[in-house]
Amino acid sequence: MGALIWLIAGVALIAAEVLSGEFFLLMLGAGALAAAGGSLLGLSVLPATLVFAAVSVLLIFAVRPALRRRLDRAIEHHTTNTEALVGRHGTVVSEVRGDHTGGRVKIGGDVWSAQAYDHQQTIESGTRVRIIEISGATAMVLAED
């Protein structure tokens, strides 16, 4: 009977891992399956619980980090949204200054509010600029030389 309980717990934990994706529940599920195996071999509740704890801790600290690193390497990381704009070039469509006064730049096909990254700088309309960072909905820009 104990083996069946451990087996059900193991399968439930492994199934729940699908929802979390952190590999933590997977390690606990494997520990529960190991305890189920121990119960089938005749271990009583306390030794089976110790098998569960030992296998789970070993997997969490030895296998899980390596598994996460391997998975993280396999996933391509793409810059999205405003991160993708940093480093791109644009053209000033209305004078940009460093004092938060309504400058505009065209980046690709979009017009953005802009501010000079160098707060002492004024950038005239038509000047090519490089986007240094995006702060909220404002592009922080530097004039290209």
Image (spheres, rainbow, N blue to C red):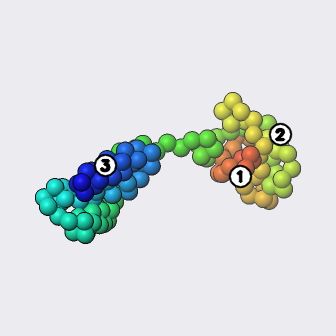
Residue 93 quadrant: top right
Q: Which mark is residue 70?
A: none
Name the residue beneath numbered marker 3.
Answer: 8
Q: Position of residue 2 (x, y in %)?
A: 25, 57
Q: Position of residue 119 (x, y in %)?
A: 78, 59
The residue identified by callout 1 is 135
- Residue 118 in sight from this viewpoint: yes
Mark 3 or 1: in front is 3
Q: Which residue is mark 2?
A: 94
Whether residue 34 can be seen here: no
Q: Nearer the viewer, residue 26 or 140?
A: 26
Which of pointers 3 and 1 lies earlier in the amino acid sequence?
3
Q: Earlier in the sequence, mark 3 or mark 2?
A: 3
The local crowd at label 3, few if under 14, some if 14 to 19, many if 20 or more residues have their Cα within 10 Å, is: some
Q: Is residue 110 above or below residue 33?
A: above
Amino acid identity at mark 2: Ser
Return the x and y of residue 126 as percentages of the image width and height: 77, 37
Quarter of the image containing the N terminus?
A: bottom left
The answer to the question of whether label 2 and label 1 lie on touching residues, with beta carbons closer than 8 A, is no
